[in-house]
Image (cartoon, rainbow, N blue to C red):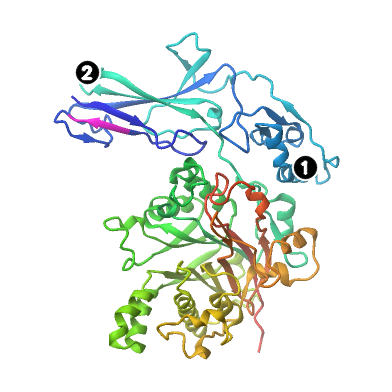
């Protein structure tokens, strides 16, 4: 007879919107063990498993702190209720919790008030908060079932009958009970005892402070976003104006790299892929970008999650997995290999052509051409790192206007998405990879008069040789990074150039004079020496900028940019990833407009 050996939950903390899949270990009659499911449609040895999920609802519902979701709330911000902010964001576990987060909490009030009537402000600077009254359990929802302990002061509600369950907002503050039992397929009578396990209280999905689009040109279409603000649920989100389009670049942190050893400061439940994938999707979809460039997307996550989920939102997908000559740490599990994924809205663009850049192939060609036979093995060991780039040529629809000058010509756009080698000691390899990509893009530019975007995680700080080459089109011979060139692949130095007229989109915050208070606030979050963001990557071990969106300034103009995150909003006691932000990088989003072509 089949029996249940063990029931285990991958995380004790259930989060709204994140599917829970229990681990059920079965023992067969022959003594072998299996974790395979045994549904009624495919019984095992004449038995199947019957599942049940129960919400255990106390007569006294316990609200959860919006800042520390594992803590019960004791205070409620009355200002939130006044401006109709979702009630779950009004709860705090202590007066200190409320005071510590006030600077960011007040932003929610200001935006909600502006959205409501455009004039309502709480000018006092002092928000009242009250102690929470005892709340009666909700009368809505499923019908109660029998509670074995009638004196417990709890009501049981059956909420699911499948192995998996996704908590809803009705479950917040309540404990869930998972039950499974072996059932005889013929008699349909349970065999043996019911196995069960309890979760901790369900918490809402933590959400970061909304990020707004900041216009960088007078009258830019990002102005609407300053009033409404970016919202995770898509409310009040910025909509691009006619003839403009938005591009998102985001390293989402592949699950294979998101280990508890590396990110010990992040709660294990917030580091789990079942949680992070939903949080990332909610964030990505909430930006409403026309083009999305993601890095560190595992091949199985692309095929099973991102491609189908973003398809539902109107996106077409392209993908390039990293090569695997160097990645010997993944034997037998190719799904763990990540890559670059580019998505674009079908109602705004059509796909024209796809190019794949494999730096391993370029390394082989380079060593064949310039490296002596005795050095080839060492050269390939240094150059072959499995990094790739994905280049997509798209045709813009732009609401029926094929080109900004209404000439009737096709408006093409070239979008490069890349993830450059991470090893900081291999400065020559980073620069060679970037130079190789730029030379490939130059060939495309020669064949077509086409605006270009170069997005990605370049693993290179502002002012480094790769960044300098991208931004200036050349490198000074005295640049310190050039001193590392054991293979001689960077010589002669004057070959390290390109003619693409690239400019970093986020340098617009620093380069443009004047502007609003919001624009000045963003300037304070950029480095005055390089004009780049102070950071796009923030962990306990590193804080700095590795991510960029470069554009060809002779054919595109920046209209607005997603505001930068300040270190204060990441909280003093943490880094990335966190329960709010599910990657160790922040997303970059830029709105562009095509320049009219000059008539000759």
- Picture coordinates of residue 163, whole percent (x, y): 36, 32
Instruction: Point out the tag, 1 or 2, that comes first from the N-terminus.
Output: 1
**Predominant secondary structure in magenta?**
strand
Would you name the residue on which mark 2 appears? 187
Q: Was residue 385 drawn as part of the magenta stretch in this picture?
A: no
Q: Is residue 13 above or below residue 589?
A: above
**In this view of the protein, which residue sits in the foreground, 213 or 317?**
213
Residue under the point 73% across and 64% down: 523
Residue 511 sits above or below residue 290 on the image: below
170 left or right of 529 in image = left
Image coords of residue 217 (percent x, y): 74, 68
Count every numbered label the image shows and give the total: 2
- Up the image or down, 7 lies above or below 528; here it is above
Query: Does residue 468 appear in the picture of this structure?
Result: yes
Other-residue count near label 1 (Cα within 10 Å), few / some / many at <14 / 14–19 / ≥20: many
* Spot occupied by residue 96 in the image (x, y as percentages of width and height): 70, 35
Which residue is labeled 1 in the image?
Answer: 113
**Magenta-colored stretch includes residue 25:** yes
Residue at image location 68% in from the left, 51% down from the top: 568
Camera-nearest residue between 328 and 312: 328
- Residue 241 visible in this rendered orientation of the protein: no
Image coordinates of residue 367 in percent, x first then y, are 34, 84
Binning the other alpha carbons within 10 Å of mark 2 as few (below 14), some (14 to 19) or many (20 upward) gives few
Q: Quadrant of the N terminus?
A: top left
> Dot 1: what SS?
helix
354 vs 283, left or right, is left
Give me the C-alpha separation between circle 1 and circle 2. 62 Å
| Magenta-highlighted residues | 24-28
- Secondary structure of residue under mark 2: loop
Q: Quadrant of residue 451?
A: bottom right
């Amino acid at each position: 007879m089949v029996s249940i050996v063990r029931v285990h939950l991958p995380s004790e903390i259930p989060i709204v919107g994140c599917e829970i899949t229990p681990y059920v270990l079965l023992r067969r009659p022959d003594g072998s063990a299996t974790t395979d499911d045994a549904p009624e449609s495919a019984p095992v040895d004449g038995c199947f498993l019957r599942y049940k999920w129960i919400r255990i609802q106390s007569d006294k519902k316990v609200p959860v702190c919006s800042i520390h979701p594992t803590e019960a709330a004791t205070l409620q911000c009355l200002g939130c209720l006044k401006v109709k902010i979702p009630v779950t964001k009004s709860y705090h576990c202590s007066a200190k919790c409320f005071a510590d987060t006030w600077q960011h909490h007040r932003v929610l009030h200001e935006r909600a008030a502006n959205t409501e009537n455009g004039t309502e402000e709480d000018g006092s600077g002092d928000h009242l908060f009250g102690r929470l009254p005892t709340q009666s359990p909700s009368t809505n929802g499923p019908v109660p079932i029998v509670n074995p302990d009638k004196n417990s002061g709890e009501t049981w509600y059956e909420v699911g009958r499948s192995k998996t369950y996704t908590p809803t907002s009705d479950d917040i503050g309540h404990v869930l009970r998972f039950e499974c039992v072996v059932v005889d397929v013929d008699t349909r009578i349970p065999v043996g005892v019911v196995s069960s396990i309890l979760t901790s209280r369900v918490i809402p999905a933590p959400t970061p402070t909304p990020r707004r689009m900041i216009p960088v040109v007078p009258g830019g279409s990002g102005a609407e976003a300053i009033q409404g603000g970016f919202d995770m649920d898509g409310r009040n989100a910025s909509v691009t104006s006619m003839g403009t389009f938005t591009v998102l670049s985001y390293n989402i942190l592949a699950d294979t790299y998101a280990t508890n050893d590396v990110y010990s400061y992040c709660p294990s439940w917030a580091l789990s892929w079942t949680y992070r994938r939903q949080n990332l999707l909610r964030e990505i979809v909430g930006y409403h970008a026309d083009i999305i460039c993601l890095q560190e997307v595992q091949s199985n996550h692309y095929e099973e999650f991102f491609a189908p989920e973003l398809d539902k939102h109107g996106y077409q997908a392209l993908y390039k997995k990293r090569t695997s000559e160097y990645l010997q740490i993944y034997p037998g599990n190719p799904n763990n290999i990540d890559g670059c994924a580019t998505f674009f809205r079908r109602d705004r663009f059509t796909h024209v052509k796809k190019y794949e850049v494999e730096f391993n192939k370029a390394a082989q060609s380079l060593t064949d051409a310039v490296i002596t036979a005795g050095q080839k093995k060492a050269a390939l060991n240094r150059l072959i790192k499995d990094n790739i780039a994905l280049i997509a040529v798209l045709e813009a629809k732009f609401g029926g206007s094929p080109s900004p000058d209404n000439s009737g010509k096709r408006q093409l756009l070239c979008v490069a998405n890349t993830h450059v080698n991470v090893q900081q000691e291999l400065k020559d390899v980073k620069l060679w990879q970037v130079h190789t990509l730029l030379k490939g893009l130059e060939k495309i530019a020669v064949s077509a008069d086409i605006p270009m975007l170069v997005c990605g995680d370049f693993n290179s700080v502002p002012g480094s040789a790769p960044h300098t080459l991208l931004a200036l089109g050349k490198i000074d011979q005295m640049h310190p990074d050039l001193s590392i060139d054991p293979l001689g692949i960077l010589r002669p130095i004057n070959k390290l150039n390109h003619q693409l007229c690239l400019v970093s989109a986020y340098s617009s915050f620093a380069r443009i004079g004047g502007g609003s208070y919001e624009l000045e606030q963003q300037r304070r979050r950029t480095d005055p020496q390089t004009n780049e963001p102070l950071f796009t990557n923030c962990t306990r071990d590193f804080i700095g900028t590795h991510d960029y969106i470069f554009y060809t300034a002779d054919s595109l103009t920046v209209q607005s940019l997603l505001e930068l995150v300040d270190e204060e909003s990441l909280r003093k006691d943490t880094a990335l990833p966190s329960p709010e932000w599910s990657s160790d990088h922040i997303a970059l989003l830029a709105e562009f407009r095509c320049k009219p072509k000059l008539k000759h």
